[in-house]
Image: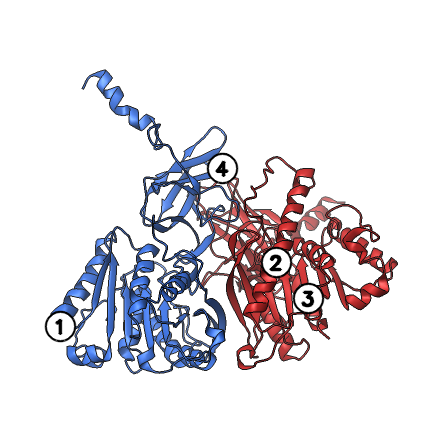
Chain colours: A blue, B red
Amino acid sequence: MTRLGLALALLPCLAAPASAQEPADFRPASSNVWDAQYPRVDSKGRVEVRLKAPEAMKVRLNFWSGPKIDMVKQPDGVWSAITEPLAPGLHYYMLIVDGVEMADTGSRSFFGGSKYASAVEVPEPGATYYTIQEVPHGQVREVWYLSKVTGTWRHALVYTQPGYDETKERYPVLYLQHGGGEDETGWVRQGHANVILDNAIADKRAKPMLVVMAYGYARRAGQQPPDLAGKGFGSPEFRKAMQDMTAAFESDVTEALIPFIDKTFRTIADRNHRAMAGLSMGGMQTFHITLNHLDLFSHIGGFSGAAGAFTLGRDLDPKTDYNAVLADPAAFAKKVPVLWLGVGTAEPERMRAGIQKLHASRTDAGIAHVYQESPGTDHEWQTWRRNLNDFAPRLFR
Amino acid sequence: MTRLGLALALLPCLAAPASAQEPADFRPASSNVWDAQYPRVDSKGRVEVRLKAPEAMKVRLNFWSGPKIDMVKQPDGVWSAITEPLAPGLHYYMLIVDGVEMADTGSRSFFGGSKYASAVEVPEPGATYYTIQEVPHGQVREVWYLSKVTGTWRHALVYTQPGYDETKERYPVLYLQHGGGEDETGWVRQGHANVILDNAIADKRAKPMLVVMAYGYARRAGQQPPDLAGKGFGSPEFRKAMQDMTAAFESDVTEALIPFIDKTFRTIADRNHRAMAGLSMGGMQTFHITLNHLDLFSHIGGFSGAAGAFTLGRDLDPKTDYNAVLADPAAFAKKVPVLWLGVGTAEPERMRAGIQKLHASRTDAGIAHVYQESPGTDHEWQTWRRNLNDFAPRLFR
């Protein structure tokens, strides 16, 4: 390559992400706090983040399921970065300032990764199903119930569909669980589950229903927190802690939450009118709880939630696990009219492999189910918004 | 002083906050995220904060209405600080790492100071009125209303008292506003307003009522955000922006919010059964809105909210301001059975002076009102929890 050729080849790099040929049309993200100008997003899905930190030595932008970028300090002490185009959806991120992970104060905070994290909403052109429309809106009700299982007051959110207060009818219920490191607010704040239901009900795609979003972490009264210091994600100690928690949550749901919901709301309190779904860890919990309690649930959804889904790691033995409810496909199909599995095509291979294995084993066993891949989305909320939007309309038919 | 005397006098400083004679009994704060060990609080109200930041050069702990402490780096890269005993209540704080203000990921985040901030709850011994008890609980309902005033969907929280769904009765309504830099979630998340009402209603101290908590920031449809860069808090530009926003919010409340609430909930939709109160900026808004609309409101509460309260800065002229409703004390008392003013004794002098001036002028004018000082508390949520706990039981008698 000639010197001139080399210089020309380097030019696009020097021109920075927003070149003269591609005028940037950055706007503050809809996920920002009131009047915050950054982060902002352009029509290509590129995200620009800024942080004023004149004294900092190093600032890094860390999208959990996306780019990790060393930000560049400008002469005015403002560090900045522009990402490549991101997939549509809500992307968690944090800033790492001199080695310390922090939320961006320009962003609203969303509970994820066991902390209040930043996130930026990249719009999906043409997608209106999860944005607020001029249709009747349900309410999202905060409720508190005293759980004898955990010995604590527990906080849950309950979506009541538009018009709930104006009728005397009873309605079916979907129990909908968040992922690991998230909490009961995730499906509304990050997922817009209430808006998805409002729109699907307004379109008459989905039946009117209540949606209960509970906190998926639980510990039996008197039980000590596990000491997992230095224990890895797949270690026996971690797995034991996960099993204890899943079992405590199973008891909480079946012994405390469901009775409370059926007492407090006008539900149709039988298995045919009760569904459960969850994402990631919530998917695992959903499989565990529903298959152990087919007397209580009839519709099941697992969104990106197959890692050790049925058996917390071990391979499933349909002949013995879960009272062998999976052993007889015809009987299972009769009991479970909807078994729904989904995953994003951009999810890490270990996530996809788990769900695909589950899908293949259900297919081999002749167990009717829905399997859907969300195009281009990762282990993130856009996958689960799409999942819910497909799953909810199939319920209670 | 002898050398020995000097050395002895210095000893307590060297002994650090937790001396051998005073065993510390630190426990994780109730305001922490699940299982976070720090921040923690001892029975004296001292707060211990830690941050792992081996690469940081300087870390400062900044309680907005409390101590500002340079944290000390331990050999393991963890910075730590222990405060002097703090007054009971919820104290906002942030960490400043190499000049960058950040939330502490061990704390839940609360919207305050126009960002998601950390806060630590210091218990008040013996005070149970704002902590959850084994009594019937109301719900807190998230609702969305389309405001023609702002041209946007607006989000509000509505407390419905225990048993609301089981009766057909209609109830009075308290409109309750957050402070500057906060949002509609403040009175529940930080203030525990729902718990205060649950407990007061269970004791039969307060009448059953609905409480509407709206977002106090508003801008008329099409109006551009004011450019306040470089403009001070008391500048004409700032004052103009505040007046515009207060006027937009006044229209939103009276033209959009109240009609929506009266249509959606079983309210008694008349002035005698409608109250309004607010803290700080919300107190100012309350005075402005209620005095301009005595046809809509009958009970008024201002919590630490007198700075320029009645007239946005200018001295009040009772003969001309607010259609002269304050000019005739007897007529006013007949129209407004409860005018409630309060402030914390530890608030900054400028906050106290404003409220005291208001109190004195009301007294001089012979206008019946309640004036209360909250002992030992600052311009913070413990003051306003106490205020609400005294104010709510006086309503709708």
Circles 1 and 3: CB atoms closer than 8 Å: no
Amino acid under label 4? Answer: Ala
Circles 3 and 4: CB atoms closer than 8 Å: no
Amino acid under label 2? Answer: Glu
What x and y, as percent, mark residue A195?
Answer: 41, 61
Q: Nearer the viewer, mark 3 or mark 2?
A: 2
Q: Secondary structure at mark 2?
A: helix
Which of the pair A71/B270 is nearer the observer? B270
Which residue does the image show at 49% across and 41% down from the upper left? A37
Q: Nearer the viewer, mark 1 or mark 3?
A: 3
Which of the pair B327/A318 is nearer the observer? B327
Q: Using the numbered discs, state the Cα–Cα distance from disc 1 to disc 4 in whole angstroms.
A: 58 Å
Residue A181 in which image quadrant: bottom left
Q: Secondary structure at mark 4?
A: loop
Q: Which residue is mark 3?
A: B275
Q: Secondary structure at mark 1?
A: loop
Q: Using the numbered discs, state the Cα–Cα distance from disc 3 to disc 4 in whole angstroms.
A: 45 Å
Label 4 lies in what chain?
A
The mark found on residue B67 in the picture is: none
Q: Which residue is mark 1?
A: A365
Label 1 lies in what chain?
A
Q: Which residue is mark 4?
A: A53
Which residue does the image show at 84% across and 52% down from the upper left? B319
Circles 3 and 2: CB atoms closer than 8 Å: no
A161 shown above or below A33: below
| Quadrant location, the C terminus of chain A | bottom left
Which residue does the image show at 88% across and 58% down from the upper left? B364
